Image (spheres, rainbow, N blue to C red):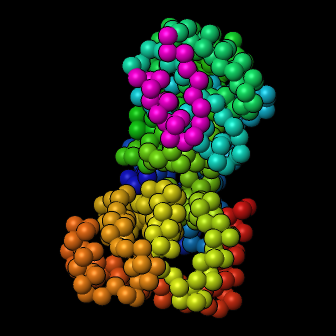
Amino acid sequence: MFESLSDRLERSFKILKGQGRITEINIAETTKEIRKALIDADVSYNIAKEFTNSVKEKAIGMNVINAVSPNQLMVKITYDELIALMGSQAVDINLKGSPAIILMAGLQGSGKTTHSAKLANLLKTKRGKKPLLVACDVYRPAAIDQLQVLGQQIGVEVYSEPENKKPVEIAKNAVRHAKDYGYDVVIIDTAGRLAVDEEMMNEIGNIKEAVNPQEILFVVDAMTGQDAVNTAKAFNDKLNFDGVILTKLDGDTRGGAALTIRKVTEKPIKFVGMGEKMEALDVFHPDRMAERILGMGDIRSFVERAQEQFDDEEAAKLSKKLAKNQFDFNDFNQQIQQIKKMGNVKDLMGMIPGMGKIIRNMDIDDDVFKSVEVMIQSMTPEERANPDIINGSRRKRIANGSGRDIQDVNRLIKQFDDIRKVMKAVNNGSGKTKGMMRAMKARGRR
């Protein structure tokens, strides 16, 4: 995420390395490089210039205390300005109403239908809501079918009227259905077009007038860069939406949309799509995004994702098994499934401070665990429960059954033994280790 921008900013800060203080000369050179980095990231020239002028104004003549170098101070000032540019703080969606109605808008291909389902899944699993998805895209072939498949995948009902070609009527009927059957959130997926047009705007405007939504979310593809910002402005001028869902932020995006959409529309980014899985929708935190852009990682989001998957009851059971040296391949496979639910592996590693630069050019397959899972599945129930009985002949059978080499099975068992030793050591570790883990969990709750 934002690798090119991160690299360029890092190089611009290096101009101040070895400098005793910030001067007009060295700060001018640094801010010039920052401005170039922002423009290359598809930030408009005017916003890039305004941003660097603000950085320069705050930095010039500032006293640098002994413990902080000009380089470090510049990073801090840029960090603060990035947060301000992206909106200062996270903004939640409005779920007031019986039911709360959320209207989804956006161009065709932006990921609107998929993110309608992702939002429903988030509200169901993390907020305890009972959402209803509504298929109001009556033009795109298979749009209704797509939403129904996604709804079935996440266990959320989809309201549709396949023979009805009047979106306003469908939306009104869906809200009535939600009231009758106790749904507390209605998410309406509307039709998109390949470009902004009057017919599209009039239709979604009519739906808005008919159902009076508490929240209108504009879904935009981050990979379209500055075009995404211009499209958002056009939609906002017509709809006066409440917030943005920025999709494909895990793709090859330069970052311009994430950095400037708030500035241009004066509306917050509320969620970001970070992958293809239904769980891959995160609340947008400007400070955490700024940390990632500047290569600081995002340990808070990492801890929060871990907390969502690893509950205290399961942790207590695992702790007892480790104490008795009973950790087996069933437990190992369960840990893998929980890690996979946390999201894209490369994205997760990028959240760890210092790891982003190390893995930047590494090709990390999201199915990195697939071969391990296949080998575990090729074991008998007895072997999974009692790993120590897996001898040479059993290893050969597991290799044949999983389509892997015997060396792969040997490597898996060696890694499993190493992990078992490490986990047992941590479980029996010092109070310092356990205290650190508690502190990380506490930090994640803040």
Horizontal and vertical percent position of residue 78: 57, 55
Rendered view: 133 above or below 321: above
- Total number of numbered discs in the rendering: 0
In the picture, residue 190 is in which quadrant? top right
Q: Is residue 390 left or right of residue 43?
A: left
Q: Residue at x 42, y 73 (%)?
A: 381
Q: Is residue 105 left or right of residue 443?
A: left
Most foreground residue, 140 or 444: 140
In the image, residue 151 sits, relative to residue 139, either above or below, namely below
Quarter location, residue 405: bottom left
Q: Is residue 117 left or right of residue 88?
A: left
Which residue: 55% across, 42% down? 154
Residue 295 x/y as whole percent? 49, 62
Residue 313 in sight here? yes
81 lies above or below 405: above
Q: Is residue 1 magenta?
A: no
Q: What residue lies at 66% left-to-right and 80% top-to-bottom?
A: 436
Q: Nearer the viewer, residue 234 or 205?
A: 205
Q: Is residue 359 left or right of residue 212?
A: left
Residue 347 can be seen in this image: no
Query: Which quadrant: the C terminus?
Result: bottom right
Magenta stretch, residue numbers:
142-163
User: Residue at the location (47% across, 60% down)?
Assistant: 340
The location of residue 353, given as percent across then percent down, is 51, 69
| 5, 76: nearer the viewer | 5
- What is the x, y in percent for residue 325? 53, 89
